[in-house]
Amino acid sequence: MNGERWSGFAARLRSAEPILASWVKTPHPHVVEVLARSELDALVLDAEHAPFGREALDACILAARATDMPVLVRPAANDAAAILQVLDGGALGVVVPHVRSAKEAAAAVKACRYVPGGRGFAGSTRAAGYTTRGMAAHRATSGEPLVIAQVEDAEALHDLPAICSTDGLDGVFVGRADLTVSLEAATPDDEGVIAAVEAICAAATNAGLPVGMFLGRTGDTAMWRERGASFFFLQSDQEFLLAGARRLVESVEL
């Protein structure tokens, strides 16, 4: 059974409480198991930009559940089959990449809900208790997975109010790196990129949605908190490894 940290996470995120999470890029459950001992609020498995296969995703979600560490997954695409695998494995929700329109946001939500043409049901999955719960009991007790739309394309900026008004959407995540590329800017600090991020924050806040982001500089968190952001996915297991190795080298005199 999952504990308080797991069971309370969705409500915390939906109510825009401050959330600090980190990416997992290494597809191995030991990484999740180790980081579950940290004070992070959650982990995000990156199946878009890291080599996560279905078995690795499943094992990492299992490790998170076993250690009461809330876990989200960024699937490779806004694809119903990819999202289904994540939810059947028992993740708390998805961070759906490259949501460019309200239509695509609605498709992501539909893939996460037991509605006609939406999420498929199987009682044999981890999420459904491996046949120990009936359909009605599972649907009544499982709650609705978190659906976070990642906005990172120039075309999405023209449809922000509609995207953020999508029924069933739980949050918006700013993909600032890809947004920089899409806007043909030189760096994420370009004035046009900053203006776009501010517009995304404002649209989400106006719609009553929490907004989150990745920041290359952790010191910028307070500034974006003031502009409406509440959840932050910062750094990754790779950066933790490199930083630890760097500190060791710097601390040892040979």
Image (cartoon, rainbow, N blue to C red):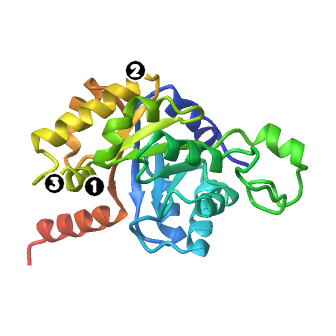
Q: Are marks 2 and 3 in contact (CB under 8 Å)?
A: no
Q: Which residue is mark 3?
A: 184
Structural distance between the alpha carbons of marks 3 and 1 = 10 Å
Question: Which of these two is toward me, 127 or 196?
Answer: 196
- The residue closer to the viewer here, 167 or 18, is 167
Query: Which residue shows up at 23% across the image and 63% down it?
Result: 243
Residues under labels 2 and 3: Cα distance? 27 Å
**Residue corresponding to mark 1:** 178
User: Across the whole image, how many numbered discs are drawn on residues?
Assistant: 3
* In-image side of 77 versus 179 (left or right): right
Q: Who's the residue at 36% across and 27% down the image?
A: 203
Element type where label 1 sits in the image = helix
Tag on residue 16? none
Residue on which the image places disc 2: 206
Mark 2 surroundings: few (<14), some (14-19) or many (≥20) residues within 10 A? some
Please say if 111 is above or below 242: above
Q: Secondary structure at mark 2?
A: helix
Label 2 is placed on what type of residue?
Answer: Asn
Q: Residues within 10 Å of mark 1 (few under 14, many from 20)?
A: some
**Where in the figure is residue 211, as x and y percent of width and height?**
39, 34
Q: Earlier in the sequence, mark 2 or mark 3?
A: 3
Q: Are marks 2 and 1 in contact (CB under 8 Å)?
A: no
Residue 120 horizontal/vertical position (percent) = 75, 56
* Residue at x-position 63% and y-position 38%: 4
What amino acid is found at the position of numbered circle 1 in the picture? Asp
Q: Residue at the bottom extreme?
A: 254
Q: CA distance from mark 2 to mark 1?
A: 24 Å
